[in-house]
């Protein structure tokens, strides 16, 4: 009667779970991939808010595509220039392209005796003047490194497109640009930009997500077969965990979460992490069947003895992921949240779907041959004997490793580069490196000039201070391709004096300056001027010029004027740029203290640098929370302060090891490596809880402490080793990734978990002996 009721309940459970799973599978078909690097900016940070406001006034520093066209014989070849010009015209016709800046079409206003004329920068139809144009261009530093490569073999086109294009429109624009360039068969062509980068990253993410899931399945099948030597012991765990992944992906789609660079490894992580509960339950279930226990009683024993431990380990693993919510980076918070949800869903399925399947299927035929039944017991007995005989050696070795790792940890640096996620051999990284080497750099440089009340950027003294700043940025800070209000005035002065290069300077008196400022529109379009100067009051008048009944108070109060300095710098790493910024701030405070404006660096690259600077604080905060929660759980289980320390020490040990590995191998602290510590701790502590829970059960049976530890070591050793091998193997599949962040997550977490299992099997028993050798009855209750 009881069996029939259980079978009826199990069928209902399977039907219900099946319906939910079908709904999730349907929703997964609508899930999308996304790569928005701005989501990695520190949210709610004043620097981020300042940049967004600055961007609204001027323009973004990434809504464009830059194209380099190379000609081995040099750029001054008629056929090459005509093809480049033809490509420029075709690019202008593409949807969502607002403007194309090309050297072949740039015209500069020059004042002559007959008024202003528009003189082409390059007279592409007239080879006879190529030598003159070449000399003129390469004596102008603002052109070399920006529109023309340093070696004179390439020109740069800048395609400015509509702001904040969606993924679909970015895809379309990227493919259109790539196809157009291919039609012209240049000797070499290179293109980088947000639209192209997004297409490349998302394509790589899609391929790797599928690859890692397939590799994880193959690897886990191998481990399960070795552990259980039964196909039954393979398909049941895999079914349970696959459904957990399906559920969490369905949850993501319903809540509007797309798969980004962090979430792409979520299926792989859930596959290996979610397997832990199932393996522990099945391992105990199979052990009971081997002892001759009937199916239903064996199930009851397995779920009763393993139940509390798996509940606690699921909670601790979920907590490890949830501590990532302390991060100021949205993708990391989302990764932590959905990973924690996946762990809990895996636990729910392990205690609903798994028992339902076990009830409805005949008890599997367990392998009772001598090798199968004695292999694990024999080797675990030997390992326990080795531990008892070499206690001193284990302790001394542990202390040495802690000292060496602590020294290595002190060597960890916080440094990041824009495309550090890609290896040097990656095609897209090589495109980026080309612009680094051949032009002024690929990292955007942005500086905001905030003019003080009643000050103007166009005053002579103000311009002289700005010129001093420009000079420092070019010659000390290392910025190239600078455009600023000063550059506009210098260019206008040159135009007023027949285009002669010696007049590329600020006029010497107010009268000369007035000629320029009065006719700024003649020296460049209003749109171009607006890229480097913004007047809040004038902007309001422009917005409401055609409106009636406008509240006059809108125009009252302090309205600021803003300037912008924009350029490129080589990507030298955040450490160097913070040093440069410190020197710049000293210069601004000492040598550029003036009554006209304040200057501050902003931009996307700087926000990424600032974000990485806070990683250590976020990581320590997350670990502190994880430590506190684990301490509470262990304290609740054993009601002992000593046991809290005993449980934390073997889990802090592998964290020290991995920090030492990072320090000695030169792996810096960055977004990807900072999350490793909390994730690894949340996962690694699972084995400790399984060990201590089993120990408590053995002591409750009245066993002596030495015998209870031995029974625990042998009883949980197999499951701990098998689950750790599954976890390490699953994470090791990630080292095949083309993303260095994913590579480091896979490698470092695998090393951490390997050290954790060694600590749990060799260090934890010794700690228990040491703390409770003479008073084990205190934990018996």
Image: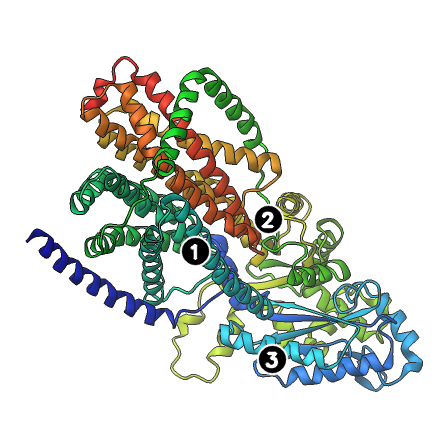
Q: Earlier in the sequence, mark 1 or mark 3?
A: 3
Q: Relative to residue 748, is residue 491 drawn left or right?
A: right
Q: How is the image coloured?
A: rainbow
Q: Closer to the camera: disc 1 or disc 3?
A: 1
Image position, residue 591 (x, y; %): 69, 46
Q: Closer to the camera: disc 2 or disc 3?
A: 2
Image position, residue 404 (x, y; %): 56, 26
Q: Nearer the viewer, residue 240 or 206?
A: 240
Residue at disc 2, secondary structure: loop
* Residue at the disc numbered 3: 98
- Give the alpha-carbon distance from disc 2 to disc 3, as whole Å: 33 Å
Q: Relative to residue 673, is residue 477 drawn left or right?
A: right
Q: Dot 3, how many residues are within 10 Å of its Cα: few (below 14), some (14-19), or many (20+)?
A: some
Q: Earlier in the sequence, mark 1 or mark 2?
A: 1
Residue at disc 1, secondary structure: helix
CB within 8 Å, label 1 to label 2: no
* Residue at the disc numbered 2: 416
Q: Dot 1, how many residues are within 10 Å of its Cα: few (below 14), some (14-19), or many (20+)?
A: some
In the rendered image, is residue 627 in sight?
A: no
**Res. 377 image quadrant:** top left
Image position, residue 334 (x, y; %): 39, 56
Q: Relative to residue 738, is residue 690 drawn left or right?
A: left
* Residue at the disc numbered 1: 217
């Amino acid at each position: 009667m009881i069996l029939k009721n259980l079978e009826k309940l199990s069928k209902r459970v399977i039907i219900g779970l099946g319906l939910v799973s079908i709904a999730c599978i349907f929703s997964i078909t609508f899930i999308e991939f996304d790569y928005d690097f701005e989501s990695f900016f520190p949210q709610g940070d004043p620097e981020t808010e300042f940049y967004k406001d600055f961007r609204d006034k001027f323009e973004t520093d990434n809504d464009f595509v830059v194209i380099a066209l190379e000609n081995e014989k040099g750029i001054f070849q008629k056929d090459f220039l005509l093809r480049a010009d033809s490509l420029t015209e075709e690019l202008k016709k593409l949807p969502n392209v607002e403007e194309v800046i090309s050297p072949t079409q740039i015209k500069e206003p020059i004042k002559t005796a007959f008024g202003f004329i528009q003189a082409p920068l390059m007279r592409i139809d007239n080879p006879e003047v190529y030598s003159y144009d070449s000399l003129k261009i390469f004596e102008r530093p603002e052109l070399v490194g920006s529109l023309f490569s340093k070696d004179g073999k390439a020109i740069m086109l800048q395609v400015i497109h509509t702001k904040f294009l969606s993924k679909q429109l970015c895809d379309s624009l990227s493919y259109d640009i790539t196809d157009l360039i291919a039609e012209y068969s240049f000797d070499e062509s290179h293109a980088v930009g947000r639209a192209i980068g997004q297409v490349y990253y998302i394509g790589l993410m899609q391929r790797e997500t599928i690859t890692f899931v397939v590799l994880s399945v193959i690897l886990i099948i191998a481990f399960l077969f070795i552990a259980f030597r039964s196909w039954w012991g393979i398909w049941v765990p895999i079914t349970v965990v696959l459904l957990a992944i399906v559920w969490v992906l369905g949850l993501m789609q319903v809540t509007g979460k797309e798969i980004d660079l962090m979430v792409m490894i979520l299926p792989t992580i859930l596959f290996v992490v979610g397997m832990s509960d199932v393996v522990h339950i099945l391992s105990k279930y199979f052990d009971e069947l081997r002892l001759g226990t009937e199916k239903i009683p064996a199930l009851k024993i397995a779920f009763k003895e393993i139940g509390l431990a798996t509940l606690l380990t699921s909670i601790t693993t979920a907590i490890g992921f949830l501590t990532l919510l302390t991060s100021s980076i949205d993708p990391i918070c989302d990764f932590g949240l959905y990973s924690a949800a996946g762990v809990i869903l895996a636990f729910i399925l392990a205690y609903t779907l798994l028992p339902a399947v076990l009830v409805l299927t005949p008890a599997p035929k367990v392998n009772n041959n001598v090798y199968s039944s004695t292999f694990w017991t024999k080797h675990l007995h030997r390992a326990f004997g080795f531990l008892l005989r070499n206690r001193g050696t284990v302790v001394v070795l542990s202390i040495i490793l802690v000292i060496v790792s602590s020294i290595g940890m002190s060597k960890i640096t916080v440094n990041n580069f824009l495309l550090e996620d890609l290896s040097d051999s990656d095609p897209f990284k090589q495109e980026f490196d080309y612009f680094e080497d051949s032009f002024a750099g690929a990292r955007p440089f942005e500086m905001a000039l905030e003019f003080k009340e009643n000050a103007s950027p166009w005053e002579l003294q103000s311009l002289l201070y700005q010129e001093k700043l420009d000079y420092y940025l070019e010659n000390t800070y290392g910025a190239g391709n600078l455009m600023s209000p000063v550059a506009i005035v210098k260019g206008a002065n040159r135009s007023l004096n027949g285009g002669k290069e010696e007049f590329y300077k600020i006029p010497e008196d107010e009268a000369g300056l007035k000629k320029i400022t009065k006719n700024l529109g003649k020296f460049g379009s209003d749109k171009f001027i607006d890229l480097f100067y913004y007047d809040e009051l004038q902007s309001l008048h422009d917005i409401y010029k055609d409106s009636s009944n406008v509240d006059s108070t809108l125009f009252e109060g302090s309205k600021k004027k803003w300037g912008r300095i924009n350029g490129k710098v080589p990507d030298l790493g955040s450490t160097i740029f913070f040093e440069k910024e410190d020197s710049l701030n000293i210069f601004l405070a000492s040598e550029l203290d003036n009554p006209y404006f304040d200057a501050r660096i902003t931009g996307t690259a700087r926000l990424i640098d600032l974000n990485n600077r806070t990683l250590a604080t976020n990581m320590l905060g997350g670990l502190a929370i994880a430590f506190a929660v684990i301490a509470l759980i262990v304290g609740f289980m054993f009601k002992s302060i000593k046991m809290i320390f005993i449980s934390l020490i073997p889990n802090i040990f592998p964290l020290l090891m991995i920090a030492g590995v990072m320090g000695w191998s030169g792996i810096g602290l960055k977004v990807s490596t900072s999350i490793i510590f909390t994730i690894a701790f949340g996962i690694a502590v699972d084995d400790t809880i399984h060990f201590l829970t089993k120990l408590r059960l053995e002591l409750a049976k009245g066993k002596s402490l030495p015998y209870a530890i031995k029974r625990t070591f042998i009883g949980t050793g197999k499951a701990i080793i098998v689950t750790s091998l599954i976890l390490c193997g699953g994470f090791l599949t990630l080292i095949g990734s083309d993303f260095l962040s994913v590579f480091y997550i896979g490698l470092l977490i695998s090393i951490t978990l390997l050290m954790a299992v060694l600590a749990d099997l060799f260090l934890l028993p010794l700690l228990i002996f040491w703390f409770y050798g003479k008073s084990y009855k205190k934990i018996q209750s």
